[in-house]
Image: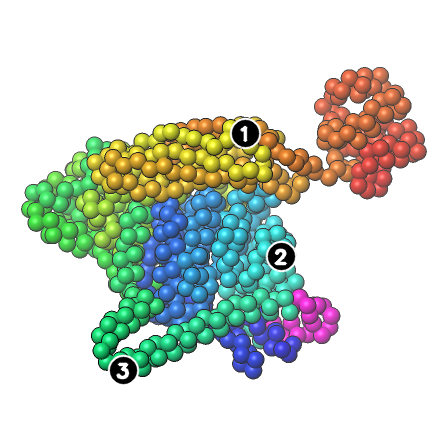
Amino acid sequence: MTLEEKASLCAGADMWRTAAVERIGVPSLFMADGPHGIRKEQADVLLGGAAPATCFPTGSALGSSWNKQLLEEVGASLGREARHLGVDLLLGPGINMKRSPLNGRNFEYYSEDPYLSGELGAGFVAGVQSEHVGATLKHFACNNTEHERMTINSVVDERTLREIYLAAFERIVKQAKPWAIMCSYNKVNGTYAAEHHELLTAILREEWGFEGFVMSDWLAVDDRVVGLKAGLDLEMPGPAEANARYIVEAVRSGKLEERVLNAAVGHVLVAAAKLAERQAEQESEQEQEQEQEQEQEQEQEQEQEQEQEQEQERARRGCDFAAHHALARRAAEECIVLLKNSGELLPLDPMQAGKIAVIGAFAQAPLYQGGGSAKVNPTQLESAWEEMGRLAAQSGGQLVLTYAAGYEAAAEGSGEGGGMQQGEQLIGEAVQLASESEAAVIFVGMPEGESRDRTDMDLPAAHIQLIQSVAAAQRNCIVVINGGSAIAMQPWIEAVPAVIMGWLPGQAGGSAIASILFGQSNPSGKLSETFPVKLSDNPSFLNFPGENGITLYGEGLYVGYRYYDKKAIQPQFPFGHGLSYSTFSYSSLKLNKAMLTDQETLNVSAQITNTGSRAGMEVVQLYVHDQESEWGRPDKELKGFVKVSLQAGQTKEVTFTLEKRDLSYYNPKVRQWVAETGRFTLLVGSSSADIRLQGEVFLKATEKLEAPKDANSTISEWLTVPSGRVALQYAAEHLVKDEVLKGELERGDLHDFYKQMPLYKFVKLVAPTEADAVRLIGMFNPINASDQT
């Protein structure tokens, strides 16, 4: 390729396509949002009229399914729709951590926990790419606020970066091998993500072995040549003619090595080659179909049988929107979380005689997705009101459903982005209706969207007043919440016996919610994020969204349940919480080893029994607690989960396999994951706060990693290595004049004042001559220590 052709491949051809080089047969890739549905726009439009596609539950909803296989099914369906719509690369999943409930883009993200996000994201990517469509991890990295998102500097320490904000990306890269990664707009510790060599090359490629291409978020590029050097392969959108000329000039002037450009082009060409393979496969399939049709004409006696087979094959290869809608409904059912069910008010009996008041505009005009780049044009849309009526009618009972709006919601029929207006008359009508009924179901919610963060965790004032007023008139009150993140409930939670978190459940959310309410489905969702009592309980409260161009990750490792555990703060609902219409017992915890080395794996098994009267699914969660560590660690960390389906009375054994990494923390001094010798507690439970079984294992580390020592290392650090101890003994015997210090050194009980002293200062203190200093430094043998004396 010419230099100009190479430069052209490093930027999009337009808003959604990569450049093609027709002269040598390099095809263009068409990409589209998004994480929960295909939003295929016209080539030159950013947010216009997208083609209809299935709107699946959003990321935060899917995260609460805790079902990796389900995520793979959803991903495969999105892959099929992408192929049907001519999309080659899907811009998803979004796997940033839910650091604060206020992040406006939380609805796109799975969880506050990197293990859960990583496992679910790996399933999603595997599903998408099983259809020969690429997936794109985003947004890499530390994109946890919409506030000043194009310029803000995310300041985070290395250990927190590794353990919390990079770990999900790492897991997905290694397990599922995504075609692409999209870097974020923000800076990370002072450097734009699009120009961050440590992130894009040293970690992503050299350490994790990423083989795809790295693209920018739209308009995230600052200096294109600096980005190329850092590892940014593709600038989006295009055309980027000025930057193409800049790249060519940089190569010719020697500012940019052509091998760096070649590497970037090579990464893009790998994806283009995968697209070419897919196109060739499709052409081959078409040829095979044509051949089959010819054979069909020649063999009249088998005509009907062959025709049926071909129809089945076409259905398998094609895009069945009806089947995808059914999957969207099943996914939504698994995502819905039953938060509270006092007195077993739920499920409602559709056979009962009487009235149920359905209250809230979102019952008829559903709040089913977020706004912004992830917004999907659904193939169809269900409302809970219509679906509840359908189920009630099908039951053949005498149940009557009545409706009151309760509040106004103006938002293109979906409730998104339209301000809520309090209306005393609407609330009064709702109260009257509820008082005349046997129960009331209130639909409330919080619209969310890209480019703006929430200002608080509260429902709109009109919704809060509606709940309080209806609950005062009707004790059998059920609240259904739609939203993408945690909601504050303190003003009204004690007054209502039942609460359902319906999330943003996608186009089939109406039937899913109706099915849960009437017991056609048994709720099995579990919270993938902690719901605090109030915003100030959240660990990021003092540092979110940031100020003066900086968002400080001051809470460090202690995100979500890690913080609430450590601070002993009782949340409204803990991470992993979710009720069922069944009950489950846990028993027979077994560890296949009582002791292991860090080169071995550990199997942890337990038996789970459905002790209820109906079939259901339980999410069994495994947490690990390090009983004693050189570095501070959370009280427990999720390291395994499985969603198990059980008939009433049925028992199944679940097994988890733990490796060294599952027992490790990241040590920034040695820049490695470290598993220390010691005892670990294995905790198996139904949520982070509902631990049912515990076991213990002893880990023997086979390798002790020592951080490199230099002149700035403290005497305490030098006491951990033989050369340091020998050198200090020499100092005591031959150099130290102070009798107190000499005695401390000889006895080995050195005072903390000296232990905390850097070596170069200690040498200055005890070495009377330059020759003594050089000799003593040589005994310690620190790197460049002589330069410090």
Quadrant location of the C terminus?
top right
- Tell whether position 255 is magenta: yes
Quadrant location of the N terminus?
bottom right
Q: CA distance from mark 3 to mark 1?
A: 69 Å
Amino acid type indicated by mark 2: Thr
Q: Nearer the viewer, residue 655 or 430?
A: 655
Amino acid type indicated by mark 3: Glu
Q: Quadrant of residue 257?
A: bottom right
Of the two numbered discs 1 and 2 on the same chain, state the one appearing first in sequence. 2
Could you classify mark 2 by the number of other residues whose Cα lies within 10 Å: few (under 14), some (14-19), or many (20 or more)? some
Residue at (57% x, 73% y) in the render: 9
Residue 595, label in figure: 1
Of the two numbered discs 3 and 1 on the same chain, state the one appearing first in sequence. 3
Could you classify mark 1 by the number of other residues whose Cα lies within 10 Å: few (under 14), some (14-19), or many (20 or more)? some
Query: Is there CB contact under 8 Å for labels 1 and 2?
Result: no
The percent coordinates of residue 614 (x first, y second) are 22, 39
User: What residue is pinned by disc 3?
Assistant: 297
Residue at (32% x, 44% y) in the render: 525
Residue at (50% x, 68% y) in the render: 274
The residue stretch that appears in magenta:
242-261
Amino acid type indicated by mark 1: Met
- Tell whether position 280 is magenta: no
User: What residue is pinned by disc 2?
Assistant: 201
Query: Is 558 drawn above or below residue 240 in the view shown?
Result: above
* Main SS, magenta residues: helix
